[in-house]
Image: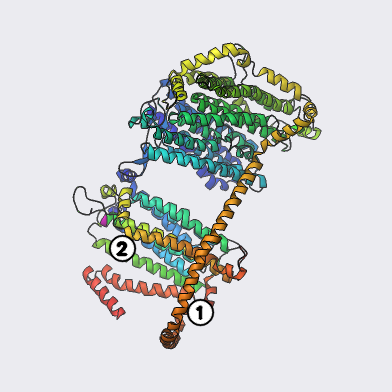
Amino acid sequence: MTVETVSNLLVAAWLLPVAGFTLVILFGRLFRDHEKPAWFTVLVMGTSFVLSAIALWQYMANGMEPYCDPWPWLAIGEGKFLEVGPYVDEVSVLLMAMVTLISTLVHIYSVGYMHGDPRKSRFMAYMQLFTFSMLTIVIANSLIQLFVGWELVGLTSYLLIGFWYEKRGPQLASKKAFVMNRIGDTGFLIGMGIVFFKFGGDLVLRSAEPGLGIFGTMAANGMNPLDLSSADQWWLTIAGIGLFCGAMGKSAQFPLHTWLPDAMEGPTPVSSIVHSATMVAAGVYLSARIFPILTPGAHLFISTIGLITLVLAAVIACAQTDIKRVLAYSTLSQLGYMILAVGVGAYTFALFHLITHAFFKCCLFQCSGSVIHACHHEQEMPKYGGLMRKMPLTAIAFAISTLAIAGAAIPYTEYALSGFYSKDGIIAGAINYGEAFGRNGMSWGSLFYWGPVIIAYVTPFYMMRAFVLTFLGKPRDKHIHDHAHEAPWTMWAPQLVLALFAIIIGWPMFRVGASIHATAPTMLTHDAAGQEHLTMMSQGFDAHTEMAHGFHLTHGFLLHGFAWIIPMVLAAVIYWNGFAITSRIFGLPVLKQLHWLVYNKFGFDGLYDTIFVALCKIVAKLAAWFDRMVVDGLVNLCGWLGKNIGFAVGGFDDQVVDGAVRGTGRSAVKLGGVFHFVQGGNLRVYVLILLAVGLAGLAVVVIPLALGWAEPAAASTAATATISALTQ
Amino acid sequence: MILAQQINDLSGIVPLLFYGFAALAVLGALGVVFSQQIVRMAIWLLFTLGAVALMYFLLGAEFLAAIQLVVYVGGTLILIIFGVMLTSKNPFTSLDIPPYERFIGWAVGLIGAALMVFTGLAVAAGSATSSQTIQETADTAASFGVTELGRSMLTKYMIPFEVAGVLLLVVMIGAAYIAKGRHEQADSGSSGGGPTA
Amino acid sequence: MTTALTSIGLSHFLVLSAIVFGCGLATVLTKRNAIGILIGVELILNAANLNLVAFNRFSWGGVPVGAGTDAVPAVDGLMFALFIIVLAAAEAAIALAIILNFYNNFASIDVERGSTLRG
């Protein structure tokens, strides 16, 4: 199989969901029950996955080169086109397979979860469109196409989060997600504009040389980023940060993170796909794609944002009692890891973690959905407890995913669940980055590795807390516990498949990841830290792992295999009896306030409300003042002038003009009597008369011509004659 | 342009595309004529506008097609729907007219269409290039670039371009003034409020 | 007959535009709703635009101005169409403003209410 065939397979896999969407949205209502359209969408998604899987297998097995099939879309000047079309390389092939697989499983899950919903087939159609949008991003060959997919994801997420629009919560949440994303998109547009106008006017992502990644064309046009003037490097920094702002919106990074936890208001299948394969993944994917143009400044910005999100979200997750909120903040924290990975230069591990995280987080959300489904739509963990016996399959899937996200591994061996490998790579990258700062005398750089290392301990803690509170211990609410039951097979089967992938996906990926990483990306340098960074990056993956390995040997106890056991045991001990211990601890004076603060997510929502509303008010007041003082003044001046000139002219008017007007008026009244019958004030009569006259004129000219009674020249003479006759 | 060329390379497809788009345009236009509810009319209009944009694509005027979509579908149509929502408690209201008037209207429409068909055919017959098909003129169409449009907008059509700009400004001010002028007088300065009929 | 059907030329576009134009006329004449009339006008304008673009392609753009090798293709038809789109947008804005004002005065957008304006 050639790479062209692979590309065509991927295009088919990409376009199938939009066909499914069209069919279901148009004809879904012809079916009385929603089951047939729903299963049809599953079939479409499954086919799409099979195609992508074949493409992945062929691409990897034959070791193909990256391939691009540009379709010129719109001409924008001499010989320049906006291009769309598929771009096939390791990353896009891998992500296509991942997205379609997870989407298929979520589709199956939705069939069970949305059972009985009156708008189920519409929901399934939206899911198809959502997947299509994400695939548009993944397969994109230019920033333009990526942006199209980007906005489609924004739209469909709005539709899906607000799917139950009868309720107030989903309405507000969907609006919030939309607006927050728009804020980020502003940055995206600015970044795209700078790339477009300053750097070659080309938005194409494909590489000139294989393996160089996107923006290779920039280098191919003779624009080696290393040779840029410092002013251009500033532009590039701004472009990188701008594009990353888009990613901040989509991947919910601090300070645009507040929409993601609220997006829980949507149906749980939506959460499970938004938090894993589609929406939040788009931001990380974009950051990884633009990696080659990121300057050291942009790197610092990105890793700082990633670090803040990572720490903040993990701390908040420890205090939440709503099971979906715990998972949402855990997603934020893991996204922080990925963004940090891009910032510190380990962007392959960002993508790696993106894929492993997609499986276990999707599984966790599906499990939480099953639990909520089984427990009367109760989401508060204080009401759960001891559900293990009632829903064993869900509990097993949840347990496996918890271990995977915690980075569980057998100490001192290479055997581990998927989350370990990816997180390990990210932490190794962070250590490198921090040490590069350290060597340049900036000791605060060590924050970049202490942050992720410490949070690697916090993650198992809050995940285990959720697991223990939900599935272990004694039932805390008798009524809910009696009602609980295992979910239908459409819901537990996808969970088990996802859990299986959460175990095994890391192993082959770890091998593949090394090969992707073997090509060091080009970096910009304009200061010592950047130079250091460049050397580090150019040493490539080997040096990377070398350093990380050395670190493992010295800090092996901290990381290698133990980071998950200690906090998990701790969490199990503390939360075995529900909140008995913690409620005593957080009764203490200072801790109480602290807990309140964390429980309320450090009050970001309130803060935004206060700041932005106040800001709007100030701007409005300023505008009003300007209006009153300046604009009104001008208007009044004009009015005053007009009035006085009017008085002056008025005298002349009264005497001379009015006389003439009165004379005309009298004759007009007489003439008016004649025309009164057509002046009924009825608009349609006016139009009718107008048209009748116009059409009659046209007929006089055209009909002789059309019937061959007159030569064209003669006809035009006739027309001229008619017109002159009419005007005389 | 290139897209148009590519389409024209597949010259067998052009008639199919044309008839497809034409059917869509006519369907939309008939829908506008025969639907009684104002919102439905707006939606049918959307189809016609979209089909006309596709026709522009077929004719090689891709920039115009984009403008058609952006300004008409994205702007004018939304404006109309706003108008509907602002002026009606129920957007599905319909206002009937006497049947005879309706038939007169349809008849005039039919006559107008017939006359235009006559005119069009006569003009096409008189034109030197009328025998050319869309496939044959593909080469010339390939050069209708945005560049060309931009250049003539700033040279040959400089004055109309400026005037259009001024017109839009005047329209903006005028529309704002007309739309809220009466309110101010009736409510003596207080903002908002319902209709003061 | 097959050639006339399969080779799309100027006349095809003119006929299509004529049909759309006729629909626009009928809409203007049969609606009592002011916004409906506006929609009819938009149809008519679109028909005119389609004509202009088609003429540009077939009668005008087909013969580049100054028939050299580097002749500039004429885009007058496209420019006209562009200006018409601008005017249509302006017209819609003004018309809707008038309709809003009308609605404020009559609490309806039935144009027959407007006949009370006669003096």
Q: Height in image: A276 above or below A441?
A: below
Of all chains, the one bearing label 1 is C
Q: Nearer the viewer, mark 1 or mark 2?
A: 1
Estimate the spatial distance between the alpha carbons at disc 1 and disc 2, rounded to whole Å: 39 Å
Q: Position of residue A588 (x, y in %)?
A: 79, 30
The C terminus of chain B appears in which quarter of the rendering? bottom right
Q: Main secondary structure of the magenta part?
A: loop
Label 1 element class: loop
Q: Amino acid at mark 1?
A: Arg
Residue C118, label in figure: 1
In the rendered image, residue A332 lying in the magenta stretch gets the answer no
Q: Amino acid at mark 2?
A: Gly
- Mark 2 closeness class: few <14, some 14–19, many ≥20 residues within 10 Å: many
Toward which corner of the image does residue B195 lie, by quadrant? bottom right
Q: Residue at x 49, y 75 (%)?
A: A682
Q: Height in image: A102 above or below A161?
A: above
Q: Position of residue A626 (x, y in %)?
A: 54, 57
In the foreground, A572 or A611: A611
Q: Relative to A25, is A716 on the left or the right?
A: left
Label 2 sits on residue = B120
Q: Position of residue A552 (x, y in %)?
A: 57, 13
Magenta region: which residues?
A: C59-63
Q: Height in image: A270 above or below A503?
A: below
Q: Position of residue C82 (x, y in %)?
A: 37, 56
Toward which corner of the image does residue A407 lie, by quadrant? top right
| Residue C109 in sight in this render | no
